[in-house]
Image (cartoon, grey):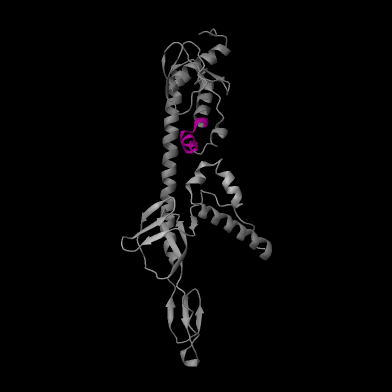
């Protein structure tokens, strides 16, 4: 697997941004997980998605700690300012960098201080204590001491419920704002026109693009199209759908030039043939209208 990493770097450039020792540490963790599964019949290893709130990786060597300036150096990342909890003496082994669900980052370092463990001490009835753990009292000792159970979860549940209710209110507000916006816009477009031409969108396919998925979900195009469709039925108006793969963005609506190399990031472009300056989205909307009317035999192919 470590040899395969070198091959994968040719396909995934981001792997080159990571310390090779850390990548090897990931394969070692995977090997240990499978060995534990087969030998101890424990749970099958679970895939660790990058969406998991807890993330960690190890740096087995080539890191340096600057105690005087509260900094640590890690390969590929460089120097990082830290809040040092404690100094250590000995040989630093693996450093593990971990991100918590709240976005905090911690670095823990395994240290070999090369000291022998102390000998077990002698004990008798006078220096031994018995402990009984429970729910009412967290612990009760044989000396008669009772330690209260702090009940952190129980005391925090009420705050959690309040936060959960607050989050639900925000989601409800966002939903109402989106519906209000779409209702007003769809009503205006239907009332002002006899027909609306629309592009047939593959929303499920577009949602696979992780860079755009959140924006697409927030826009809620499908919901908007539904409102246009049933309001068109109410008022006797028309909805015209063009085909999904019609190149509305790449065709100059003036002369018909096809800009094959147009990319999503190109928001404006100039037609090489007729020199018309295009706003990408306005050009697309004009083409959608032309394609829709053309299929209704209401416009000639030349416009």
Q: Quadrant of residue 63?
A: bottom left
Which x, y percent locates residue 93?
47, 65
Q: Quadrant of residue 40?
A: bottom right
Which x, y percent locates residue 155?
42, 64
Q: Nearer the viewer, residue 180 or 204?
A: 204
Which x, y percent locates residue 133?
50, 77
Magenta segment includes 73 = no
Residue at horizontal 60 percent and vertical 54 percent from the top: 46
Q: Nearer the viewer, residue 299 or 81?
A: 81
Q: Nearer the viewer, residue 65 or 224?
A: 65
Magenta segment includes 213 = yes
Relative to 6, say whether 277 is above or below.
above
Q: Quadrant of residue 170?
A: top left
Is 233 displayed left or right of 162 in the figure? Answer: right
Relative to 17, say whether 129 is above or below.
below
Residue at horizontal 53 percent and vertical 13 percent from the top: 293
Residue numbers of the magenta segment:
211-222
Q: Main secondary structure of the magenta part?
A: helix
Relative to 288, say whether 148 is above or below.
below
Residue lying at the far left in this picture: please name it: 69
Q: Nearer the viewer, residue 148 or 227?
A: 148
Residue at horizontal 64 percent and vertical 58 percent from the top: 34
Which x, y percent locates residue 21?
51, 55
Is 133 displayed left or right of 38 in the figure? Answer: left
Picture mark count: 0
Q: Is residue 247 visible?
A: yes
Residue at horizontal 65 percent and vertical 61 percent from the top: 35
Q: Is residue 195 visible?
A: no
């Amino acid at each position: 697997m470590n040899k395969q990493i070198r091959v994968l770097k040719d396909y995934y450039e981001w792997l080159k941004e990571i310390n090779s020792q850390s990548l090897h540490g990931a394969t070692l963790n995977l090997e240990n997980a499978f060995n534990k599964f087969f030998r101890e019949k424990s749970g099958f290893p679970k895939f660790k998605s990058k969406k998991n709130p807890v993330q960690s990786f190890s740096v087995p060597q080539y890191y340096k700690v600057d105690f005087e300036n509260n900094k640590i150096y890690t390969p590929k990342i460089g120097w990082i300012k830290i809040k040092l909890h404690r100094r250590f003496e000995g040989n630093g082994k693996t450093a593990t960098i971990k991100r918590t669900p709240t976005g905090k980052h911690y670095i823990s370092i395994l240290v070999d201080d090369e000291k022998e463990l102390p000998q077990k001490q002698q004990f008798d009835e006078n220096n031994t204590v018995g402990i009984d753990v429970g729910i009412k009292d967290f612990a009760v000792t044989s000396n008669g001491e009772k330690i209260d159970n702090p009940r952190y979860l129980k005391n925090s549940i009420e705050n959690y419920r309040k936060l959960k209710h607050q989050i639900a209110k925000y989601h409800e507000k966002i939903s109402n704002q989106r519906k209000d916006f779409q209702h007003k816009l769809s009503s205006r477009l239907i009332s002002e026109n006899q027909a609306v031409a629309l592009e047939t969108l593959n929303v499920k396919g577009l949602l696979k693009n992780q860079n755009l998925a959140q924006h697409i979900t927030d826009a809620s195009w499908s919901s908007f199209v539904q409102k246009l469709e049933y309001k068109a039925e109410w008022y006797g108006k028309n909805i015209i759908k063009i085909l999904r793969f019609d190149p509305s963005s790449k065709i100059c609506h003036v002369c018909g030039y096809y800009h094959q190399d147009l990319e999503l990031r190109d928001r404006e472009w100039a037609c090489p043939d007729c020199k018309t300056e295009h706003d990408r989205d306005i050009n697309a909307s004009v083409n959608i209208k032309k394609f829709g009317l053309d299929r209704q035999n209401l416009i000639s192919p030349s416009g």
